[in-house]
Amino acid sequence: MKEPRLDILVIEDNELNRYLLTFLLEHRGHRVRSATDGPAGIALAKALLPDLILLDIQLPTMHGYEVAATLREVESVGNIPIIAVTSHAMAGDREKALAAGCSGYIEKPIDPDTFVDEVESVCWQSPDMESS
Amino acid sequence: MSTNRPDDEYGQNTALPPSYEPGRKWSLRCRALLITAVYAIVASLWIYASDHALMALAADTEIFSRWSVYKGIGFVLVTSLLLLLLIWWAFGALEKAYTDLKTLNQNLEKRVRARTHELESVATRAETADQLKSSFLATMSHELRTPLNSIIGFTGIILQGMAGPITREQKKQLGMVRSSARHLLDLINDVLDISKIEAGQLQIRREPFDLTDAIDRVIGSVRPLAEKKGLSLHRDIAAGLSTMRSDRRRVEQILLNLLNNAIKFTDQGSVALHVELEPAWIPPATVDDANNGTSPRSEQPVTAVRFQVTDTGIGIRPEDIEQLFKPFNQVDSGLTRQHDGTGLGLAICSRLTDLLGGTIKVHSQWSQGSEFTVILPLELP
Ligand SMILES: Nc1ncnc2c1ncn2[C@@H]1O[C@H](COP(=O)(O)OP(=O)(O)OP(=O)(O)O)[C@@H](O)[C@H]1O
Ligand SMILES: [Mg+2]
């Protein structure tokens, strides 16, 4: 694989889903760390400064949009691209996710064939603020 | 049912006491007149007759005048007594009427308070029921989908060989698992959609979006199906169509359903989607409009978009067309039974077009093909 390996933080409460996302990303050579809820995810993001955050929207205690908005406020992690992962039929989720500061949006059920490509394209599309 | 009390109960409860009927007033006045007249006649007769008798009995005028005074005093005493009785009785009746009125008033107040309370509790109960319903639907959508998403995801991983090599038979069977899971997911989404709509919980968004993009997305997602069946799939969009202001997701859902049907019920030939502008379209009167009577909205022509999905498939018999938009309805012609589905697609389409302020119509020729037409206002008010 030519692309540089990405450091990815997965925030997802469902164990199977976390495993699924981790498996798919690791299979393509990315490094994955994960958190099971919003506050833990925010803390981990500040500590690890990952290249990308995959954020489940339906989280317990703290809603995904809130997590995204909070992350955007923090200077050190404010520029890390966030991809929202949500399930179908919540009308307007895409708009809400983008409004909350996410750079991308992937709908569940995720398609294992294309999922990692989608994630990578969002990451490499978004302007890399750190290098400028 | 507390809201459906019989009318006569209200009638009894709120009726005035009998002495307040208008006819009664005149009979009371007549009685007063009668009593006075009887008194005047009896008194005059008494004075006249007693004077005569006294005059005949009395020896001289002095005795006559003395007795006349006694007689007068006696008369006054007797009539005073009678007057007292009359006033006593009348005041008694007045007092009774007054207390009756007072208790009636109090009862009425109590009843109004009770009814108000009842109505309030019904309203709050309805509100809680609504909240329960919507949170139930939201929870269900999440809880039902999550495990399915795992099933679909993991079968995908294994099918791709990411978790190690699998045999051809295993691949075939896992493919079946995945397509069943996808089918189940579609079903759950449909059932949840229709229950959300029926519960009035579906929120329609109004946002500008590019019509061509939306149509291309829909066509792109059904193209593999059409190719698999060897059908040609056409798409033509009239010039001048760009931005629509409506609920993009729901518009796409309607078109997706219609195109999926067209492909599903066509074995050879073609399926096409035509889209054009309808410059002066009269929107249908909504339920609200019908209720308040005055509706400038239902009269004024607006700009609309006409979507037409045509196929060369099995068609629909005229007698089946009426049933088409009802939930869980599949035309049972023996032919269609070989296609899977729940019969929710068109029910959802028709409710969604309603919510988006549009109409849906079908034209079909049995064994020739069908044409579904959806007209939606370009700008959702
Ligand atoms: N294009 C068409 N040609 C012929 N028959 C059709 C067509 N579209 C719908 N029908 C008939 O109307 C019925 C109801 O359609 P609907 O989309 O509601 O249900 P379905 O496609 O059977 O199931 P679902 O969409 O829920 O998976 C179908 O079962 C079929 O009999
Ligand atoms: Mg259908």
Image (cartoon, grey):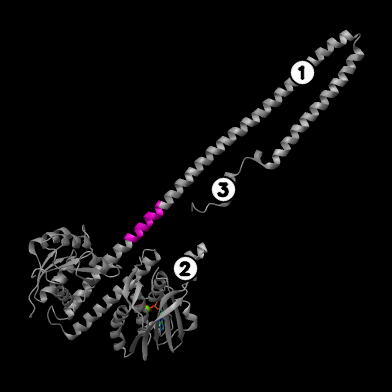
Question: On what subunit does the disc labeled 1 rest?
Answer: B
Against B278, residue A64 (above or below) is above
Chain identity of mark 3: B
Q: Is residue A16 magenta?
A: no
Q: Distance between the residues labelled 1 and 2?
A: 84 Å
Q: How crowded is mark 3: few (under 14 residues within 10 Å), some or many (20 or more)?
A: few
Taking depth in this image into account, of B189 and A101 the one nearest to the observer is A101
Horizontally, residue B73 falls left or right of residue A95, namely right
CA–CA distance between discs 3 and 2? 39 Å
Please report contact status of discs 3 and 2: CB closer than 8 Å, yes or no: no
- Residue A62 visible at all: yes
The residue where tag 2 is placed is B297
The location of residue B222, given as percent across then percent down, is: 30, 82
* Badge 1 amino acid: Val
- Residue at label 1? B76
Q: In the rendered structure, which disc, 1 or 3, sits on the residue that comes first in sequence?
A: 3
For the residues carrying marks 3 and 2, which lies nearer the camera in this image?
2
Q: In this view, does B159 lie above or below B13?
A: below
State whether discs 1 and 3 lie on one chain: yes
- Ligand 2 picture quarter: bottom left
From the viewer's perspective, tell me whether residue A19 is left or right of residue B86. left
Secondary element at tag 3? helix
Q: Distance between the residues labelled 1 and 3?
A: 52 Å
Residue B168's place in the image compared with B150, above or below, is below
Residue drawn at x 91%, y 8% is: B60
Disc 1 packing (10 Å; few <14; some 14–19; many ≥20): few
Q: Do labels 1 and 2 share a chain?
A: yes
Please identify the dominant SS of the magenta region: helix
Residue at image position (31%, 82%) is B219
Residue plotted at (56% across, 38% down): B104
Pointers 1 and 2 in contact (C-beta within 8 Å) = no
Which stretch is magenta? B124-135
